[in-house]
Image (cartoon, grey):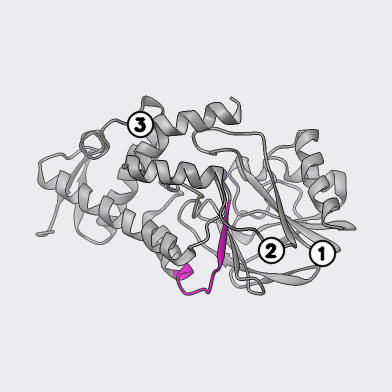
């Protein structure tokens, strides 16, 4: 699928599902076409040619630094993808790609990491919880570690929710957050249990509110200028969905399928499963809070929610 087709497809389905509002859809589609602000000079990106419903225009792979640069996420091992990343590094005047970092281990973020390491000699890092996952990592990182690049450092923030080992990287000099799939340029992140966890996800978003962020550079979609507003909007969106799940349960809907049908009207078949994952993730959060119980495949309200 080409980028243009993918973008057209989002208009029909994913944003309607993920955002539930056509007004929101149009605004975000415009933002996707016209980023309103620039990235700092020492940051460039190359978008992988892997557009789709889950990847929007494709995965954003970032190059950060001056002489010695760090690459965040490598989606594809194709030569053309690696050429694109290396060209960005060269255009910044970089002499060496020193390190490769991964926001998380979904294939659209790590699929080309070993290939880029092989081609450039960069050291490949991965979150501690995923050590050995790719079989060629050189180092591991954990929450609050600092990773140096030419001209600064990245603060590692372990932000589980979308994926249990997910990390964001914060650069305090220019107040930039590389958000991976925790926050996207438009639409919302997919939370797919059991590795995806809504309780963790909301905690991760709350934590990000504690950082002074001028721009969010997401794993997919355009950069986000109003960081705090975006994070609050993300939290609000999930809390509204939770209320909708509770309302569906009160209405006697008690299976994931029935609840999904009530909440997500007009969902394209391609996104039906994604919607169900989201409902499941909300139900699991509510069970953990003692507000819902599960009997085989039925979910029942416990207290007077
Ligand atoms: Zn992704």
Vertical relation: 145 (above or below) 35:
below
Residue pointed to by mark 1: 66
Q: What stretch is highlighted in magenta?
A: 207-218
Residue 212 lies in the magenta stretch: yes
Report the disc number at residue 40: 2
Instruction: Tell which quarter ligand 1 is in.
Output: top right
* Visible residue check, residue 82: yes
Callout in the foreground (3, 2):
2
Q: Of 300 and 223, which appears nearest the observer?
A: 223
Give the mark nearer the N terminus: 3 vs 2: 2
The answer to whether residue 192 shows anywhere in this view is no
Image coords of residue 177 (percent x, y): 58, 63
Within 10 Å of disc 2 (Cα), the crowding (few <14, some 14-19, many 20+) is: few
Q: Which residue is drawn at 53% across and 51% down?
A: 181
**Location of residue 200 with respect to 18 vertically, above or below:** below
Tag 1: Cα neighbours inside 10 Å, few (<14), some, or many (≥20)? many
The secondary structure type at the circle numbered 2 is: loop
Q: In which quarter of the image is the C terminus?
A: bottom left
Name the quadrant containing residue 155: bottom right
Identity of the residue drawn at 47% across and 47% down: 186
Q: Do the residues labelled 2 and 1 touch (CB within 8 Å)?
A: no
In the rendered image, residue 197, in percent from the top left (x then y), is placed at: 41, 53
95 w.r.t. 147: above or below: above
In this rendered view, identify the residue nearer to me: 243 or 95.
Answer: 95
Task: Tell me what residue is drawn at x 20 percent, y 53 percent.
Answer: 292
């Amino acid at each position: 699928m080409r980028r243009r087709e993918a973008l057209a497809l989002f208009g029909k389905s994913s944003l309607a599902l993920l955002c539930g509002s056509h007004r929101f859809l149009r605004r975000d589609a415009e933002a996707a076409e016209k980023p309103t602000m620039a990235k700092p000079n020492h940051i460039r990106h190359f978008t992988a040619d892997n557009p789709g419903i889950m990847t929007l225009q494709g995965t954003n792979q970032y190059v950060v630094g001056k002489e010695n640069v760090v690459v965040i996420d490598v989606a594809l091992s194709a030569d053309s993808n690696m050429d694109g990343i290396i060209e960005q590094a060269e255009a910044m005047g970089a002499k060496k790609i020193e390190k490769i970092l991964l926001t998380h281990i979904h294939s659209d973020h790590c699929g080309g990491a070993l290939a880029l390491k092989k081609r450039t000699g960069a050291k490949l890092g991965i979150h501690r919880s995923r050590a050995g996952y790719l079989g060629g990592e050189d180092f591991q990182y954990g929450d609050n570690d600092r990773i140096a690049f030419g001209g600064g450092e990245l603060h590692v923030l372990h932000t589980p929710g979308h994926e249990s080992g997910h990390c964001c990287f914060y650069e305090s000099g220019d107040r930039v957050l590389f958000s991976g799939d925790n926050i996207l340029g438009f639409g919302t992140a997919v939370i797919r249990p059991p590795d995806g966890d809504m309780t963790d996800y909301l905690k991760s978003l709350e934590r990000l509110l504690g950082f002074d962020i001028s721009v969010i550079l997401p794993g997919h979609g355009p950069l986000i200028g109003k960081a705090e507003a975006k994070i609050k909007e993300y939290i609000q969106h999930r809390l509204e969905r939770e209320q909708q799940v509770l309302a569906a349960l009160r209405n006697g809907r008690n299976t994931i399928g029935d609840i999904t049908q009530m909440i997500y009207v007009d969902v394209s078949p391609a996104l039906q499963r994604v919607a169900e994952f989201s409902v499941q993730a909300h139900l699991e959060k509510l069970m953990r809070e003692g507000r819902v119980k599960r009997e085989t495949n039925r979910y029942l309200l416990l207290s007077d929610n």
